[in-house]
Image (cartoon, rainbow, N blue to C red):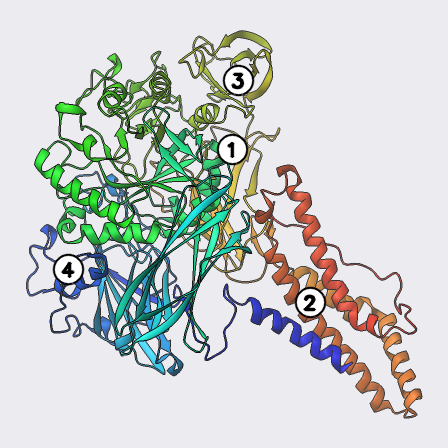
Amino acid sequence: MFFFTICGLLLPALIYQVNASPHNAQPKHRLGRERINLNSDWKFRRWEENPDGLIYDYRQDLKNLTDVSILKPWILPSGNDFIKDNSKHYQRPEGNPGSNVTFVQNDFDDQCWTSVTLPHDWAIAGPFYAEPDGEAIVGGGMGRLPVFGVGWYRRKLHISNDDKNKQIQLELGGAMSYAMVWLNGKLIGGWPYPYNSFQLDLTPHLQFGQDNQIAIRLDNPVDSARWYPGGGLYRDVWLTKTEHTHVNQWGTRFTTRDVSNDSAVIDLQLSLGNTADYTSKVSVVTEIYRSNTVTGQQGRMAASFPATTVEIEANDKISINQTLLLSSPQLWGPPPTQTPNTYIGVTRLLNETGIQVDTYETRFGIRKFEYTGDDGLRVNGERVRVQGVNEHHDLGALGAAFNVRAAERKLEILRELGVNAIRMAHNPPASELLDLTDKMGFLVFDEVFDSWERNKTANDFHLIFSDWHEQDLRAMIRRDANHPSIMVWSIGNEVGEQNYTQELTEIATTLYAIAHDEDPTRPVTASMNFAQPGNNGAPFPDILDVLSINYQGEGIRDTPNYAVTKGITTKPAYPLFHEDQPDKLIWTSESASTVSTRGTYFFPVTDDGGAPVNDSSGGNTTLAQVSAYELYSANFGSSPDKVFATQDQNPYVGGEFVWTGFDYIGEPTPYYTSRSSYSGIIDLAGFKKDRFFLYQARWRPDLPMVHILPHWNWAGREGQVTPVHVFTSGDEAELFLNNKSMGRQLLIQYKYRLRWDNITYEPGELHVVSYKAGKFWAEATVRTTGPAVSLRLTADRQSISADGVDLSYITADVLDSQGSVIPTANPKIEFSVSGSGEIIATDNGDPADLVAFTSGAHINNRHMEAGSRIFALSTQRLEMFQALQRYDAPVPLIPAAMALCYFLISGGEAFWTNALQRCQALDKKTGIVTKIDCIKKIADYILAAVATCFGAYLITAYLRNRTSLSDHKQKYPRGNNRVLSLLKITFWDLLMLALMCYPEIGHTKNGEANRANQPVAESPKGYLS
């Protein structure tokens, strides 16, 4: 019996030791690399005005400051590793600026500061500035949120005496902005550009065996961006420990060539460093492993580079190059016609005694990109039409703080749309987002700058361009180059130098050369919105490898409806660029800029193929809303229909990146009284606009679908003309109003929607049937709904990890008695959560809604928009929480409690009788019959039962978390999701009961069960679905 008690207690402890972190625990003194997440336990405070007399450099908004310390000379050396010419490296001056500021000192009391967990966006909680643009501190362009000011972050960091011979680096994924870092009062360095990742060496200033104080200062200027930048340490922070001899930061570069289905050549460039004061000799071994396309886990070894031995001088770095030929490679390519296979390169360094001193893993892919003038983009020999969208870096109501699940959800929605490419507008993304694009198979247009020396806003990147352009461009490419999803580097977006020949030539050729020096395998581009081909303008097209055109391809303001707008006018420019550069790939890096508000429709509807939005054309300034007939655009834009037609008329065009996939915070053209944009195919909350289905019909022609707009709740419009438009992947459709045919229409060449513009409204039902090649294809119905009677909550996932990071997006819909969503419903709804769950944010997708995204951890109020809104939930504790009387139990607390009751209560008489019989039998066998012995045996048995119950609970908690339904979405059809989830939950519950019954099974007499027909605990009801 003692054996079962010990097993019950030790087994969960063993499970915990193996799985407590993503990396298995290492022996205390083991050599090698260790990477520790530092996202927790930070203290934070923000000031609107400069509180400390420190600045990076003078700028316009700081001109009135006096008696300040300029830290630029101490920060510039942080980028030396990314300046190729050693003679241009910056030397750190003497002195230690900022050491007298109390915030950097170890003994400063920060208990009154706010406790935060990273990633953290200090502005997203609001409130929104509601004043007009000229009066608001932050206007619509930057999202009307308090992004500006100085913020300080502080954290204690304990470093063990065992780490005295380690190199210890602080890694910041992104810091908004002008980051400066102190350790124990010593200025270590920093990085002003907020979108790049960077690393600082803490080693010389650490206090081993005690707590160290990290202090990070950020400074966000007003007018620093054209969109919402966020504020704070908005990406992950890591601590990396290595031996003196190690693989350098981003020190592996895998490239592939001569790629076919039969073989591929893999070239590896390794950068190794030695920070010791003696020469180091190491053996280098790099092995290539296959990677599971679903889980990303390492599979069997596919190949290995020859082992090599190198010597690295004291305080030096070296590079080594290796090559191998891989047979039958699994190629990376975009779905649905290809599979995004990846490999994992594992590089190991072994010292002269054969002990492993470093391990460095790199995920990469094998693929072949071809960029052609006449056939667009080819991936692995197949033409792939780019069906792309532009995406800014914010995650809607979560702000700029990066969250893997939130980003994954966006990509899932975009994949449903038919998107196969993302343009990172207009800055380097979080590296975790590129991990997702690799895994999910999206092509990536990776962009570094929005401006060069000519500014777009008063305090944008132009202030630091001359000092930091090389470091920032090299840092982006060096970090991102192994990602197979990246197909092109962009050195700028709509830069002001486009038509200034000398400036453009000097800067563009410099950046072009840097990009090709860092990565000669990918082309270089930049997005042009008014550069001209040939002799008509500056030689931008001549310098670039790929021609990325913004709006010019489909023509700008070249139709009668746009004659009322001011600005440049161009005819469709694809033919001009193609004639001038016939061998270069051409695509549209920004197309359409159509604007709309989900579920909002204004009349009359333009009878043209598109029109600029204004109060007489699809817009309403008072309401700050735009009609969702999806025909209205920004003054420089076009309707999707026009973009499709011009691309189809010019089939050599490689595709497009629509502006934008999702609405984003800031830049709310045409109504700058609002908080967020109108240009998304999907709104800020993640709800699909009608435009979603227009693009889906084009981008997924094999998907049977048809969509009707508008909704059919038009009380007061009886008898008035209410146009009906239909989007379908079929080639014709018939519309019915209250079972009466309104006619059958055919999609002819260069026509992308079916329009019944003379329908007069009457309540009832619209029904459409679409056909393809004369056969039934799809159908859809919209109905006039009744009054609201209920709310429906729908979670996007069955369970979430209890780590405070994972999210469940829950959609709330207002329903009538027939279960239909009421498209005009906009009641104010109060949401609350009880238990350990937390409402992270809520949104309804309305760009004009200035209610803060978060108004408390457990309660939030917001109006519905078009009958729906969404809120995001997270939890840090392994327990149930309740949202509007619906439950989510990510781990089996209910089954555990039921099982414990089963042992201690429901077993009842049979349990005690069985225990006493065993006790008596044992006493008779030993010949010692005492009451104390019986009591001891019964107590031992109960202890074994309780210990096993507890152990089984922890085991099944872990197992159930590991088998989240979201992991199986690709493996199982959607219709089986709920059944599968219940089966999994029941499986682990039954397993737990079996484990808890094991002590009794182990004591069966003559192999026969002592308990027959025992009750089985049922799987609990109420899981979110």
Q: Amino acid at mark 2?
A: Ala
The answer to whether the residue labelled 1 contacts the one labelled 2, judged by CB atoms less than 8 Å apart, is no
Q: Amino acid at mark 1?
A: Thr
Mark 3–mark 4 Cα distance, whole angstroms, equals 59 Å
Badge nearest the viewer, 2 or 3: 3
Q: Is residue 486 above or below residue 52?
A: above
Q: Residue at x 56, y 23 (%)?
A: 704
Residue toward you, 829 or 563: 563
Give the image location of residue 896, x and y in percent: 69, 64
Q: Residue at x 57, y 39 (%)?
A: 792
Give the image location of residue 17, x and y in percent: 56, 72
Q: Residue at x 33, y 12 (%)?
A: 608
Visible residue check, residue 890 = no
Location of residue 371 (image quadrant): top left
Q: Is residue 54 left or right of residue 582?
A: left
| Mark 2 neighbour density, 10 Å: few (under 14) some (14–19) many (20 or more) | many
Disc number placed over residue 730 in the picture, else none: 3
Mark 1–mark 3 Cα distance, whole angstroms, equals 21 Å
Q: Is residue 261 left or right of residue 74?
A: right
Residue wearing tag 4: 56
Q: Is residue 215 left or right of residue 535?
A: right
Q: Is residue 932 above or below residue 341?
A: below
Secondary structure beneath dot 2 equals helix
Q: Is residue 211 left or right of residue 933?
A: left
